[in-house]
């Protein structure tokens, strides 16, 4: 299956997974240090997953006929999603700063970032599996 996926796309998936694991580690540490409650960290993770699934729309995943591989490219709608994603990333602390402060805000931001990476990872893997399934490469 790996031979049917573009190397850049595999690299991007690995980066998403690594960032998610790092953010999950920070999140677990912050929960044990009682910087953030388990419920609030879970809410941040779920919010991040939702944002990540939407952000996965930045890139269109499709089959490239010449290389016989799944590739990912940005399109017009994806460019608009990138703008909103970037705005949220820049103003996240300002938006969330009304409700959370200090270390709790940082911990909540880590849980959102982890969720975003997990959401993007899951959505992209889902798209890849759909494409490979339609091609009869996986079942």
Image: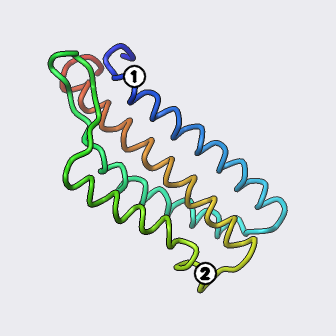
67 lies left or right of 110: left
Screen quadrant of the N terminus: top left
Disc 2 on helix, strand or loop?
A: loop
In the rendered image of this protein, does residue 25 appear above or below residue 27? Answer: above
Dividing the picture into quadrants, the one containing residue 128 is: top left
Residue at the far left in the pictured view: 65
Tell me the residue that label 1 is attached to.
7
In what element is the residue under mark 1? helix
Taking the view exactly as shown, the residue that stands out farthest to the bottom is: 98
Residue indicated by mark 2: 97
Tell me the residue at 42%/47% (across/down).
Answer: 120
Picture coordinates of residue 85, whole percent (x, y) = 40, 61
Q: Residues within 10 Å of mark 1 (few under 14, many from 20)?
A: some
Residue located at (38% from left, 53% from top): 53
| Left or right of 111 in this view: 65 | left
Q: Position of residue 117 (x, y in %)?
A: 50, 48
Query: Going by the image, does 46 lie left or right of 24?
Result: left
Query: Is 13 left, or right, of 68 in this rendering?
Result: right
Residue at horizontal 38 percent and vertical 35 percent from the top: 125
Image quadrant where one finds the C terminus:
top left
Q: Position of residue 123 (x, y in %)?
A: 37, 44
């Amino acid at each position: 299956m790996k031979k049917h996926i573009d190397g850049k796309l595999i690299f991007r998936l690995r980066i998403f997974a690594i960032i998610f694991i790092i953010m999950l580690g920070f999140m677990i540490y912050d929960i044990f240090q009682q910087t953030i409650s388990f419920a609030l960290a879970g809410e941040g993770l779920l919010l991040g997953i939702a944002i990540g699934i939407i952000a996965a729309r930045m890139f269109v995943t499709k089959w490239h006929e010449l290389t016989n591989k799944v590739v990912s490219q940005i399109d017009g709608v994806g460019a608009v999603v990138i703008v909103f994603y970037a705005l949220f990333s820049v103003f996240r602390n300002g938006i969330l700063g009304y409700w959370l402060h200090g270390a709790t805000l940082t911990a909540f931001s880590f849980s959102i970032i982890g969720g975003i990476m997990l959401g993007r990872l899951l959505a992209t893997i889902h798209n890849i599996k759909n494409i490979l399934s339609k091609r009869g490469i996986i079942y």
